[in-house]
Image (cartoon, helix red, strand yellow):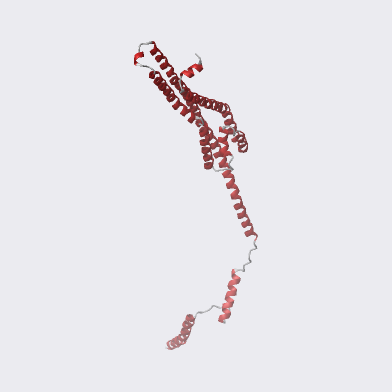
Amino acid sequence: MDVVQIFRDGGPAMWPLLALSILSLSVIIERLWFWVRILSQESEIVNRILNTASANWGSATELAKRAVNQPIGRFLYAPLRLVKPDPELFRLALEASAEDELSSMRQGEKVLEAVIALAPLLGLLGTVLGLIQSLGNIRLGDLGTAAAAGVTTGIGQSLISTAAGLIVAISSLVFYRLFQGFVVNQVKVFRRSGSDLELLYRQYWQNISASMSTIEERPNLELVTTKENITTSQPTRLQQPTSFQSDVGVEERTQDLGTSPHEPIASPEATEIGEQESNETPHNNENHRDNSQF
């Protein structure tokens, strides 16, 4: 059967169906080429970057930079291009890059969704228009005659648009689901490779923090050592013996009191008690002599 003749018999709805089929076919070819390039090189890029990152982060950054033409390369290069970020910033860069790349992978899905929704409706519209045209030419007097035989042929031809719309919608739906499966698989790949890279960076960041803390402690230790050296290098002040200081103090006090430094110093109360005893002593001596006479 001639394709051109079938297209003509389908009616006016075949033209928008042809446009939708061309649009859907272009998107399918572009997406197939996109996914073939990704799936053929993705695992090699991930393994090389992760293996290099475990030994040298600078070399891993260069490898990721050379692979920016691939989504997985751009995803891994986004946090590596930062200058020694903390682990939280590293994880945020991975998440932001993953969202951008996954959204770009879904390119063309909206077009396929539109084709899947519109193609059956356009085919049904072509069928309805064909039935209206076929049944509009029938007159009651022509029923059962040779003139009514062409009505069945017109109805069959009007169903061509419905079949064409269903073919376009079904083929677009198949590839649409296939591309969605690829995107879901990429989510798993991004999550696994991002987690491995983040784990390696956290270990690397712990080593950086330990080295930085050691460098920060060294100036304090040197400062303390310098202070100790300064303290020990200062000359000690000569102190006079305690006995000499006490003798000097005693001499000064005795000079003030008008006494010898080796004589005991009596307090005023002791002086008064001594005078009273001296006054009482002659009296006691006289009583002793009187008693001796008796």
The answer to whether 266 is drawn above or below residue 42 in the figure is below
- The answer to whether one can see residue 279 in this image is yes
Furthest toward the left, the residue is 140
Q: Position of residue 77 (x, y in %)?
A: 58, 37
Residue appearing at x 48%, y 17% in the figure: 6
- Viewer-side residue, 293 vs 152: 152
Residue appearing at x 49%, y 16% in the figure: 5
Furthest toward the front, the residue is 141
- Position of 204 with respect to 112 (left or right) is right
Q: Where is residue 216 in the image (x, y as percent from the top left)?
A: 59, 49
**The image quarter in which residue 242 lies:** bottom right
Q: Quadrant of the C terminus?
A: bottom left
Tally of numbered discs: 0
- Position of 150 with respect to 252 (left or right) is left
- The answer to whether one can see residue 259 in this image is no
**The image quarter in which residue 138 lies:** top left
- Position of 110 with respect to 211 (left or right) is left
The answer to whether 138 is drawn above or below residue 196 in the figure is above
- Viewer-side residue, 194 vs 119: 119
The answer to whether 19 is drawn above or below residue 208 in the figure is above
Q: Position of residue 246 (x, y in %)?
A: 58, 72
- Viewer-side residue, 268 vs 205: 205
Q: Position of residue 268 (x, y in %)?
A: 49, 81
